[in-house]
């Protein structure tokens, strides 16, 4: 796959896929486990972190919503012709409409929003749009767009992806901060529902072209969300929108250097590890009353 000589991907099947509805009941335990997976609790007496770890008076991280009612590893289905071992999550954009309760039942719907072709040996980009709502009321909780790079499935003749916008402002950052991932970060984060062996199994990681298991993109996403809010002196509950592109692989245990620029209607950010860009096209929007 990817050579341009034999293309197994079935674009029509992907674009027509019916996800149906996915229902999920989550508990305080699930929300707390997610918070630990994105790095909260490093300081066990930090009252801001404890608000998301104490089941007696629990607040829920908004980014927890992106893990809920997931369609799972649907791309493993052989009828799509995807080389699943070479799939990488490359971008995430989520808007958070309402606070998640400490526990509840939610409903997720999904659709394939687009499938674009980067060309032979360069892969394809698949965008999945998902809507998360409260089962009992229908109240919208989160809308998200997830971009997947199908590294082994380009050259099928589809439309090219849109040109990416500029990565970061050409000026000094307004704020700089640093966040360190736990060496066990991927092992904890996967318990929130992403069972891709790429993040656990050294042999699976090697088969995909990596030296060892890598960190989940959404694990980095949630970790950075909390770090950005902390740096700006805001509660994570103020989060309204967070978008970024995963421009480089992040390993568990890595130290991320974050740069933040203030805009009239929000913030933009990027991140590097040892000078290597790993996040760009970052966009953060916070509500004005939290």
Image: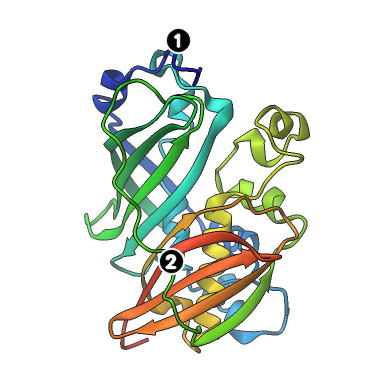
**Decide: marks 1, 2 in contact (CB < 8 A)?**
no
Give the left or right position of residue 244, taking residue 211 as reference.
left
Q: Residue at x 65, y 31 (%)?
A: 208
Counting from the top left corner in percent of width and height, residue 48 is at 58, 83
What residue did someone put label 2 on?
A: 282
- Asked if residue 155 is positioned above or below residue 20 in the image, the reply reads above
Residue 129 versus residue 59: which sits nearer the camera? 129
What residue did someone put label 1 on?
A: 6
Which of the two marks, 1 or 2, is nearer to us in this view? Answer: 1
The crowding category of the residue bearing disc 2, from other C-alpha atoms within 10 Å (few below 14, some 14 to 19, many at least 20), is: many
Secondary structure of residue under mark 1 = loop
Residue 87 versus residue 209: which sits nearer the camera? 209
- Asked if residue 43 is positioned above or below residue 75 in the image, the reply reads below
Counting from the top left corner in percent of width and height, residue 59 is at 48, 73
The crowding category of the residue bearing disc 1, from other C-alpha atoms within 10 Å (few below 14, some 14 to 19, many at least 20), is: few
- The mark that comes first in sequence, 1 or 2, is 1
Give the left or right position of residue 195, taking residue 133 as reference.
right
Q: Is residue 137 visible?
A: yes
Counting from the top left corner in percent of width and height, residue 222 is at 53, 63
């Amino acid at each position: 796959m990817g050579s341009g000589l034999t293309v197994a991907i079935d674009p029509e099947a992907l674009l027509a896929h019916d996800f149906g509805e996915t229902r999920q009941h989550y508990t305080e335990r699930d929300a707390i486990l997610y918070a630990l997976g994105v790095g909260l609790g490093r300081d066990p007496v930090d009252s801001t972190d404890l608000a998301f770890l104490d089941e007696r008076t629990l607040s829920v991280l908004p980014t927890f919503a992106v893990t809920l009612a997931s369609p799972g590893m649907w791309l493993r289905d052989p009828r799509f012709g995807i080389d699943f071992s070479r799939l990488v999550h490359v971008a995430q954009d989520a808007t958070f409409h309402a606070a998640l309760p400490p526990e509840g039942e939610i409903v997720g719907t999904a659709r394939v929003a687009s499938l674009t072709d980067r060309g032979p040996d360069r892969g394809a980009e698949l965008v999945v749009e998902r809507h998360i709502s409260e089962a009992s009321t229908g109240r919208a909780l989160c809308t998200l767009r997830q971009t997947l790079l199908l590294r082994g499935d380009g050259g099928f003749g589809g439309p090219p992806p849109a040109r990416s916008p500029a990565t970061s402002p050409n000026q000094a950052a307004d704020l700089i901060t640093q966040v360190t991932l736990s060496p066990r970060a991927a092992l904890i984060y996967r318990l929130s529902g992403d069972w891709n062996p790429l993040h656990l199994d050294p042999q699976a990681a090697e088969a995909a072209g990596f030296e060892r298991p890598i960190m989940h993109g959404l694990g980095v996403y949630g970790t950075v969300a909390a770090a950005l809010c902390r740096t700006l002196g805001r509660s994570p509950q103020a989060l309204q929108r967070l978008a970024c592109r995963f421009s480089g692989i992040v390993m568990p245990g890595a130290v991320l250097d974050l740069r933040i620029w203030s805009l009239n209607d929000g913030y933009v950010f990027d991140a590097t590890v040892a000078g290597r860009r790993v996040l760009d096209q970052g966009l953060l929007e916070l509500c004005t009353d939290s």
